[in-house]
Amino acid sequence: MRIVVLAGGIGGARFLAGVRATGEEVTAVVNVGDDVTLHGLRICPDLDSVMYTLGGGADRERGWGRAGETWVVKEELAAYGAEPAWFGLGDRDLATHLVRTRMLGAGYPLSAVTEALCARWQPGVRLLPATDDRLETHVVTGGRALHFQEWWVRYRAELPAQRFVFVGADAAKPAAGVLDALADADVVLVAPSNPVVSIAPILAVTELRDALVRGTVPVVGISPIIGGAPVRGMADKCLAALDVPCTAAGVGDLYGARSAGGILDAWLVDTADAGTGVAGVPVRAHPLWMSDEAATLAIVREALAAA
Ligand code: GDP
Ligand code: CA
């Protein structure tokens, strides 16, 4: 069986570990809206979170970046007063960004660069960026627009967001391999990732979204919201900006039924949210805490059964 997963970073990576455990052929289409250029280096936080986590190189406690990380370069940059100082670039992590930036500069698309980086990490699933084109999430707050990373990391999502803008999305094409993966898939799973800043930027690539909406492959979503709260992270603040209730039903309605121009054929919610109704979409309840790989695999099996 061929499984395609739409995913963000940390939640996406955890979910993908469970999908990989099925032993099926897995392609992850990963958000690039968080990508940013800092100190001249191209940084892809979600692709790297997935790559490091599945490749066994992630810092489990911090939740992002490399295990065994050191911060000498960051200290040296701070000694120069080099901005931005709010973004934590670890020494080990830097090597990834150096290789990526050099390859991009030589003309390789991000999909090819990602494949090259994965030759080292062997994540066990195929990682594809949603697009090889520039697509960046910006946050409109108090009359100005900030890059998503600045809003999230520097301001801890404390500046009220009025809007999220996916800069470049109108012109962005699906990355090499994405449309073929969707056409060849037996099922598409939407990971329990942040719906507003991880999944929406993927769906903002018009041809990618059209392939899902118009395709014949069943699409099953897994709710990132349990009992009215995001399990980790700040999805509540992102949903508030869209006036979407922070509930399993709110996110299900945001994705929408395929029969009504949305993407979902089925929606998986936590047992705490059993009874959730989403117009036009069959809803199943199952425990959705990804506490370990076995629990996550059970979630994936339930999603496959729904498909
Ligand atoms: P990011 O890009 O690193 O922010 O990661 P994602 O967007 O992929 O995932 C973040 C989302 O994962 C959060 O909004 C949480 O709601 C969701 N999440 C995290 N852990 C769990 C879990 O154990 N179960 C479920 N259902 N959702 C989770
Ligand atoms: Ca992210």
Image: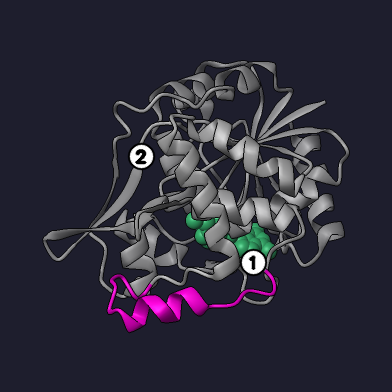
Q: Of the residues tagged 2 and 1, which is closer to the observer?
A: 1
Q: Quadrant of ligand 1?
A: bottom right
Q: CA distance from mark 2 to mark 1?
A: 25 Å
Number of residues whose C-alpha sits closer than 10 Å to that of mark 1, classed few (under 14), some (14–19) or many (20 or more): many
Residue 260 in the image: state x and y as whole percent. 45, 26
Residue 63 in the image: state x and y as whole percent. 62, 70
Q: Magenta segment range? A: 67-86
286 drawn magenta: no
Predominant secondary structure, magenta span? loop
Question: Which residue is at a point 77% across and 51% down the rendered structure image?
Answer: 17
Which image quarter: residue 7? top right
Q: Is residue 194 visible?
A: no
81 drawn magenta: yes
> On the image, numbered disc 2 is attached to which residue?
135
The amino acid pointed to by label 1 is Arg
> On the image, numbered disc 1 is attached to which residue?
66
Answer left or right for 6 relative to 303.
Answer: left
